[in-house]
Image (cartoon, helix red, strand yellow):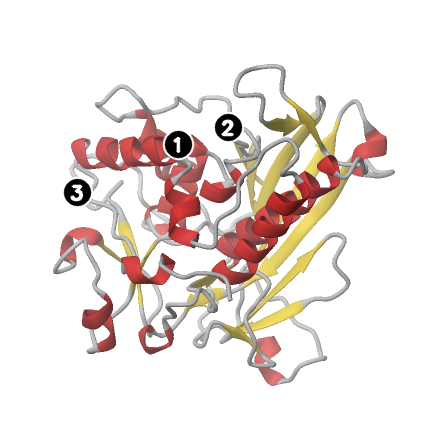
Amino acid sequence: AVVSTQSTGEHEQKRKVLAGILVRSSEQKEVAGTDDLQVLVLSTGTKCVDGEKLSTTGSVVNDSHAEVLARRAFKRFLLEQVKRFHSNETSILVKSSDPPFLLTVKPGLSFHLYISTAPCGDARIYCKNDATDVGNKSRGVLRSKIECGEGTIPVSNLASHVQTWDGVKAGERLCTMSCSDKLALWNVIGVQGAVLSHFIQPLFFDSIVIGGLFNMAHITRALVSRTNQGTNGVNVIRDDLLILPVSPQENRIAGKSCNYAKNWILGENSTEIIKTGEGLTTEGVPSRLSKNSLFKKFNEVCSAVTHSMPYLTQFYSAAKADAESYQLRKKRVFEGLAEAGYGRWVGKPIEQDMFILS
């Protein structure tokens, strides 16, 4: 997809991917607004940060692919909704009646992800004339984005599934899991992430809408079937997830993608632009979607709810690790993918999460 404006220069005319998350209200239109369907966040982007810009303070955005930014923007939106709930303001959240009595989404609301093209990785590894997957060992495997390049490679091609800080800084290419793999993971453990799991129950997309350049069999395998085949018996079967095409197949358009990414969040007054190679905004400051910024927002929420849910830490890694149920589900998905022969998940150097708020 090409998303262009005339406000910030020629780079806006380059190829991009657009993603957005919407809420649909079937019963409580006053929550979602006057319309039955409302956009919550929008983003564009196709690239990742350069390895030399990786940060130990959580100040850079590592992955600026559109669907990843949309999810990070959605997490920021949800943090604000938690804060509003505990401040007795209008919120899309209510308290669950089930232990451990976390917040959950109000009845009648559902969430839907739109992506203008199939996500990178396994969902995009096909030929237009492919009729079958039989005998093709490249189908289903976990894949990694590569620093300073476009496209993905199988994780089996990497020297190690463990990335080290000094290795990356010495010149090893920084690897980032593909969007297909990340979406498959979120479809099992939820899109809320670790730190939000202290406040809300797992939250899932009810549908994923693809704008073009997709193959239904391949995208279903990539986002759903792989995690349904885990052999350790713990993965959630997502046979209720709808994957919907909305336009005819487009022809391939050759060209380089943009070095900038954008994000917009309902309730915030500006559109933010990120230099993807640097992971910072065009003003040279941390994005509102960076780990550090989201963790600051998390601690603001913690301060607002201490009367009912005391939790406050300056250590980002501790806040993630303490979400024990979430981390266990995540670990078991990784184990299931490995047991099914799809490969081992490649994580970022652990040092990037070992920061405290200043």
The amino acid pointed to by label 3 is Lys
Question: Quadrant location of residue 338?
Answer: top left
Q: Answer above or below: position of 232 versus 174.
A: above
Front residue (pair 200, 11)? 200
The amino acid pointed to by label 1 is Val
Per the rendering, the mark at residue 2 is: none
User: Can you name the residue that lies furthest to the bottom here?
Assistant: 9
Separation (CA) of disc 2 from disc 3: 26 Å
Asked whether, in this view, residue 138 is left or right of residue 186, the answer is left
Residue 351 appears in the figure: yes
Task: Say which of marks 1 and 3 sits in front.
Answer: 1
The amino acid pointed to by label 2 is Leu
Q: Are marks 2 and 3 in contact (CB under 8 Å)?
A: no
Separation (CA) of disc 1 from disc 3: 18 Å
Classed neighbour count for the residue bearing mark 3: other residues with Cα under 10 Å, few (<14), some (14–19), many (≥20)? few
Tag 1 secondary structure: helix
Location of mark 3 (residue): 137
Tag 2 secondary structure: loop
Name the residue: 65% across, 71% down: 4
Tag 3 secondary structure: loop
Location of mark 1 (residue): 224
